[in-house]
Image (cartoon, coloured by chain):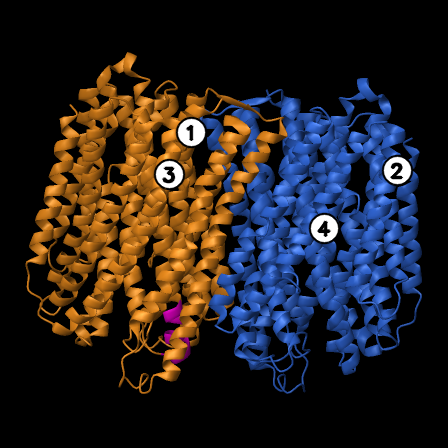
Chain colours: A blue, B orange
Amino acid sequence: MIAIPIITGLGAIFLAVFFAFSILKREIVSKKMEEVAGYIKSGANAYLTRQIKVILSVTPILFLFLYFFLGWREAVTAVLGVITSLTAAFVGMSICVRANLQTADVAGQSSLKSFRTAVLGGAIMGFCITGFSLTVLAILYIIFQSPQPIIGFGFGASLAALFAQIGGGIFTKSADVGADLVGKVEENIPEDDPRNAAVIADLVGDNVGDCAGRGADLFQTLSDDIITGSIVASTLIPKYGMKVMFFPLILLAAGVTASAIGILSTNNGENGLKPVKIFDKGLIISTIFSVIFSFFATKIILGDLNIWVASLLGLAATLVAAITTRYYAGMEGKPVEKIAEASKRGAALNMITALGYGLQSPIASIIMIVSAIIFAFNLSGGMLFAVVAVNIGTDLLIAFIMASDAFGPIVDNAAGIAEMSKAPKNVIKSLSSLDSVGNTMKATTKAYAMSSGTVTAFVIFATFFTMTKVREFDVTKPQNLGFLFLGICLPYLISSLVIKSTASGAEKMVDEVRRQFRTIKGLLEGKAIPDYARCVDIATKNALKEMILPGMISIVVPILVGFAFGATALGCLLIGAVSSAALLGPFFNNLGTSLDNAKKLIEDNEGQKGSFAHSSAVIGDTIGDPLKDVAGPSLLIFMKLIGMSALLIAPLLK
Amino acid sequence: MIAIPIITGLGAIFLAVFFAFSILKREIVSKKMEEVAGYIKSGANAYLTRQIKVILSVTPILFLFLYFFLGWREAVTAVLGVITSLTAAFVGMSICVRANLQTADVAGQSSLKSFRTAVLGGAIMGFCITGFSLTVLAILYIIFQSPQPIIGFGFGASLAALFAQIGGGIFTKSADVGADLVGKVEENIPEDDPRNAAVIADLVGDNVGDCAGRGADLFQTLSDDIITGSIVASTLIPKYGMKVMFFPLILLAAGVTASAIGILSTNNGENGLKPVKIFDKGLIISTIFSVIFSFFATKIILGDLNIWVASLLGLAATLVAAITTRYYAGMEGKPVEKIAEASKRGAALNMITALGYGLQSPIASIIMIVSAIIFAFNLSGGMLFAVVAVNIGTDLLIAFIMASDAFGPIVDNAAGIAEMSKAPKNVIKSLSSLDSVGNTMKATTKAYAMSSGTVTAFVIFATFFTMTKVREFDVTKPQNLGFLFLGICLPYLISSLVIKSTASGAEKMVDEVRRQFRTIKGLLEGKAIPDYARCVDIATKNALKEMILPGMISIVVPILVGFAFGATALGCLLIGAVSSAALLGPFFNNLGTSLDNAKKLIEDNEGQKGSFAHSSAVIGDTIGDPLKDVAGPSLLIFMKLIGMSALLIAPLLK
């Protein structure tokens, strides 16, 4: 039975390798594009290598700590989690920095070919992440025969992902904000203009932030959900038999297979269909097959269809999250239209209107998640395992979602490469239209990841309280509520730190770009080349320095509270931290995306570029950047990391 | 013993009346100022009368509901709470709209006289609010001999305050944002310029939002704290005797007396001392006398000095809140300096930097509060009454804080009146410098009110769970955590609604001011007078329409959840809602104030008005307006209202 996830996982990896070869074997036509892409690739590799070194340099301390307190199993799996997560991120980024060039280069031939190349690039990410996770976890189960030691793996994966996301996010948004502030606002030159010194750093950032960061994020999401699911499942062996322990893995194998069908369908997308429609069709196909495959998986392994219904509720919750995000942040929804309209009255009303919508945007999704969990729990007669099924249900489409997400940075980079290598107007235009599709997909992925993270939180709470035997807490004791309040503070603290880091990085970037415009003769006239490497270096140093503190707080605080004040205090801190992040995170994500899309909506109207409304919307968009690409995504990972830290030390707490 | 609060209360009211006469007996010199102030007074009266009518029109429904479900006592006290709160707000505003004119008029004679007049105006507010609360509550105790029926009074006071704050806040910020967007940003004319049609509405707004709104807010804060304190105290009658029930009232009478000494000291402030220093001196004097008086009150009534220490911890928590707010949002702190510095690189970095600091600004204060509560609780050997003492401790300085807060809108209005009636430059300048003092005081008050609200929340949680006998909740049941998550959503929903309402009001205002500049000939040249009344009318209609929904949600949701899902669900909702508001509220308040002060800091540098940095900072300031003056203050009251609603229906829940 454990063979199913291994076969599915290896199959996914095989597909990824096959697609990678089919993309890379093509000869590049444009030498100019190859040169630009070369800058990006070397910048991205240089950053990621240094980032990995920093993360690996703390790994021995982690190993020793876990070894002394928990034993060699947890220590080894944690290090393995760190390494696998970093590998997933590195592989993902390596594909992105190659697929972007191919996408840009092939755009000269046909826009459909270019779309397909980007889709294939995304698909490689989707298959890599899920294939790695399923295979490695299944093998760990075979080795340890129990989910307990594997918690270390999830902890390690989440830890590495948090550093990767914070570091990558600060890098990309320092560069992006810095490039925009001088380029678009002061010098009035277009985005991705080769005269802007920060533009290569910005494109590098898309790879290290969006591609590597998101890859590590979804890898940890999937792994954590499988691990926590198995812990709960193992309590049900008396009822369902040994096979129940593999149920999360097998259900996800079914989901990955269904997603694979959906992904392959997008690659054969007919000419003439809009890219968003092709993705929607792929999503529907993945959903239908997920429903069917999960039915058989549940029927055969457990024979309990209530569990199947529970997993469908999870699936439905992710779809509701995607739909509400489309409404609040998508180009077609009323909010973005209203924000664009408000921009005519200035940057302040643009932002105030966006805040008004952004603050309410997470609520529908939270209500759906809470209802799904309560309904599934009651339907199963009060089994926690039903909540696990809801949680795994939220992950069924993960391979598809990862694929459509990675499409985003690939086309974003491709558009940048085309712009910088002064490709023909029609090539640039066809790539930019793909870029805005990528934006919508990115927002959807974050919504999905947040809803999955929120359901996971419920599983982690229950697992933690079951493990520590603190089933209840006394609400009349102020200490308990006190730690809950402190937990609520944590996401504010982490957001604050990463936003400040981005701002300080962006300030340095603004100064550097301004300096280059001032001191390099002929730069603004296009007669000289800026010093791109210096901007990459500034962004790198800033990001690596600034990622340490928020990353450390995320693990040190829960561990300290657990050891110093006991399991109840840690449980209360956990509830506060996760519930606070579950609102603050999607608020940041949706706010930022809606501001971005309001700007795009204005740009879509001919002649609006450079108008008062447009420059107001550009300010809003820039404010939204660190919120949607640094703070929001970091909180997503934080939610899981703090939970895994708590589970990891749970056996040591009274 | 009950005579002490009644005598103190009546004494406070007597002082208020005495000061009112001493201000009002003075003849106004400037007819022009009298005319401008007349516009403001009639606009404010018209708005407040309509607002009171709207609130009173729902009172019979409230009465019938409470009468049928809880009995006549709760119904009568609730209506009394609504009426007293509205009276407090109305009285406060009536004083403000008279004191502002006197302050502006006397500024021609001497800036010290003008300062003293504004201080006296504020003192009247401080004495009114505390005098009303002490006297009415003491009489209710004599009538009912039990705190239970008086919960209705607190509920009614909070309900009326919420409507007053939301309505007044939307009114003032629609007008303010609208006036600024066209005046400062588009037409480049100064603030409070008589050519701007929205400027009278803006000045009216300061009275109905800041003066009436804050008055109602502090009235409900004080009343709720006394009532919840007495409920807990009544469980201790076996230990301390009957007198313990009056302890909260008497301790507060001590605080009000101490504050009165502090307030009187500011009125005699030496010439030459900076206004902020005079207030600081007054605060120190109030604090010292509070420490002394509360020592004797505790010693004589309870003989338990641990309770005295607990109340000092509460006092210390408010001081810490005030100090951290000064740091994060004051003109002297590093954050405001950094925000001003970032403005040189554009509006986006101004806002991003402010967000970075704003998000972390509430944390120190929360840590202090939580530590104070836990320490006091453990010191007293686990008595909930120690938390009550911390809570009352946070209110000891309330009369002083109310007085220094009301100083703000009075000098703000006075500066506006001087500007509009084209008073001499030196008069305008001396009044504007007082205005920036007012801003700091306002931010301090909000910080104080938020810390007091957070401590109250702990008392309410404990009281609620004691009343409903749900001492613990099972964390492995997803329903409990689900309602906690829904509770976390509520402050987001309410903020979202009030911000959207402000934005839509501001949009209408922008359109109207633009229209008047376009259609009224000679307006921009100062040869014609704009139609002020139309702008007041637009703001009024918008505010009254928009205050209904967020106000209703705040009471209907907890009551529905309580009846439909029981006491545990309501308790979890309560914890979520209050803890979420405890962070989101001060985040909004500090963010908005820091943006405002960053703009002021830039303006303080000669020649910076109109620079790129300044116009960037003006955008940030405008974004911050609805956050600090609508959303943040509304959440403050919401925190207490939702708690009082829960306590009110607690006896009906299983």
> Mark 1 is on which residue type?
Ile
Q: Nearer the viewer, mark 1 or mark 4?
A: 1
Determine the chain carrying the residue at label 1. B
- CB of mark 3 within 8 Å of CB of mark 2? no
Identify the mark nearer the N-term, 4 or 2: 2
Left/right placement of residue A348 relative to residue A630 reads left
Residue at label 2? A5
Determine the chain carrying the residue at label 2. A
- CB of mark 4 within 8 Å of CB of mark 3? no
Work out how far the residue at label 4 is from the one at label 2, CA to CA, in angstroms: 29 Å
Residue at label 1? B649
Are marks 4 and 2 in one subunit?
Answer: yes
Are marks 4 and 3 in one subunit?
Answer: no
Please say whether residue A89 is visible from this viewpoint: yes
Dot 3 alpha-carbon crowd within 10 angstroms: few under 14, some 14 to 19, many 20 or more? some
Q: Which residues are magenta?
A: B178-188
